[in-house]
Image: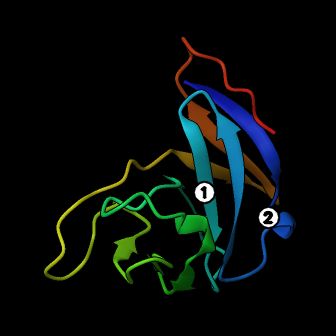
Amino acid sequence: MDWIEIGSLDDIPPRGARTVESHLGQIAVFRTAKDEVFALINKCPHSGGPLSEGIVSGRKVTCPLHNWVIDLGTGEADGPDEGCTNVIPVRQEGRRLLLGLDAHRKAAVA
């Protein structure tokens, strides 16, 4: 797996997100209030809503379109809703953030 640097923890507000373009499509990178970092494909499993524009609460994000609640660690919808979005490996080295992307397909991270 290739680890692609995407910036700093300071680039993402607490309880917020930023997006990164890759060969997988748009990836939403989230920061919790406790400075945990998660990355998901930026599409709600319900109707493709932009998860990066949702509200982060704890380790979950609420889709801004229809209020589906998605677990940031698993990508799965909570409650009676069913569906899942892909989780992207992310790691933190000091304040630097890196995404784990398939070594066979390089990303064009913006």
Give the secondary structure at mark 1: strand
**In front here: 61 or 46?**
46
Q: Nearer the viewer, residue 5 or 61?
A: 61
Query: Where does the C terminus fall, quadrant-wise?
Result: top right
- Quadrant (top left, top right, bottom left, bottom right) of the N terminus: top right
Q: Residue at x 60, y 57 (%)?
A: 28
Q: Is residue 16 left or right of residue 56?
A: right
Which residue lies at the image location 35% right of the left edge and 61% below the top edge?
Answer: 47
Residue 35 lies in quadrant: bottom right
**In the displayed structure, would residue 2 be above or below residue 68?**
above
Mark linked to residue 9: 2
- Identity of the amino acid at label 2? Leu
**Residue that badge 1 annotates:** 28
- The residue at 36%/79% (across/down) is 69
Q: Is residue 3 above or below residue 90?
A: above
Residue 25: image location, x then y, percent:
57, 37
Please name the amino acid that badge 1 sits on. Ala
Is residue 55 shown left or right of residue 46?
right
